[in-house]
Amino acid sequence: MPKKSRSSPEINAGSMADIAFLLLIFFLVTTTIDTDKGIAIKLPPMPEENQPQEDLKLKERNVLKILVNSYDQLLVDGELTSIKDLKRKTKEFIDNPAGDPTLAETPMKAVISLKNDRGTSYNTYIQVHNELKAAYNELRNAMANAKFGKPFDKLNKEQTEEIQNYYRQVISEAEPENIGGTN
């Protein structure tokens, strides 16, 4: 007797495409995609076109030069400095309480020039930025308490603008280079 061949029942594949489509939609709707936000830095306004070139030049004493090499070493005006001392030095440079002729003439003319090596670690980069911002925040808060009797974050819009105009946060960041010995 010949053997009967059994045919297996066919699966209806017509609804498979619908199920795959619904799963795809489900995953697209429920999945969140994190985006890197980076560091928010407000750029200064562009100088006016008819402004004389002499007005755009900076005096050497009004620029605090900060250099971070690939070994995460910090040089402030050519002097090896630790990150924990950066805020103090920055505040002293900006405010110049003793009238030192090597520091900024006024807080409104102070410029921080920051240059990093391509090999600088991201952690050090962030720490330097945090210390610079903390220096400005402390100076602004001290002025707000002295002038208005309340902390900077409790001031109204006009008072906030007055202090921000006096302690303008001007940080000039140069393009990173290979300056520290490693690539």
Image (tube, rainbow, N blue to C red):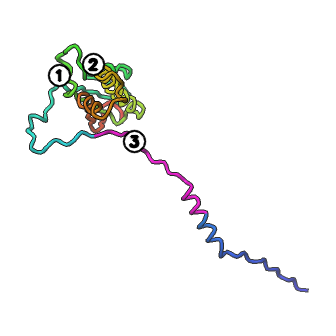
Q: Give, as a three-letter code, the residue at label 2.
A: Glu
Q: Nearer the viewer, residue 22 or 4?
A: 22
Q: Nearer the viewer, mark 3 or mark 1?
A: 1
Q: Nearer the viewer, residue 45 or 155?
A: 155
Q: Is residue 9 above or below residue 162?
A: below
Label 2 crowd (10 A; few <14 / some 14-19 / many >=20):
some
Q: Quadrant of the C terminus?
A: top left
Residue nearer the viewer, 38 or 1: 38
Of the numbered discs 2 and 3, the one sitting upstream in the chain is: 3
Q: Which residue does the numbered mark 1 point to in the structure image? A: 105
Can residue 70 be seen by looking at this rendering? Answer: no
Q: Could you say where residue 53 lies in the image, as x and y percent from the top left?
A: 9, 37
Disc with the residue nearer the chain's start (2 vs 1): 2
**In contact (CB < 8 Å): disc 3 and disc 1:** no
**Res 10 quadrant in image:** bottom right
Outermost residue, top side: 98
Whether the magenta-drawn stretch holds residue 54 is answered as no
Q: Nearer the viewer, residue 76 or 15?
A: 15
Image coordinates of residue 150 in percent, x first then y, are: 35, 23
The part of the image, by quadrant, that contains residue 157 is: top left
| Magenta region | 23-42
Q: Position of residue 62 (x, y in %)?
A: 19, 25
Residue at the (37%, 34%) spot, across then down = 119
Gap between marks 2 and 1 measured at Cα: 12 Å
Mark 2 secondary-structure assignment = helix
Q: Which residue is mark 2?
A: 92
Question: What label sits on residue 38 in the rendered view?
Answer: 3
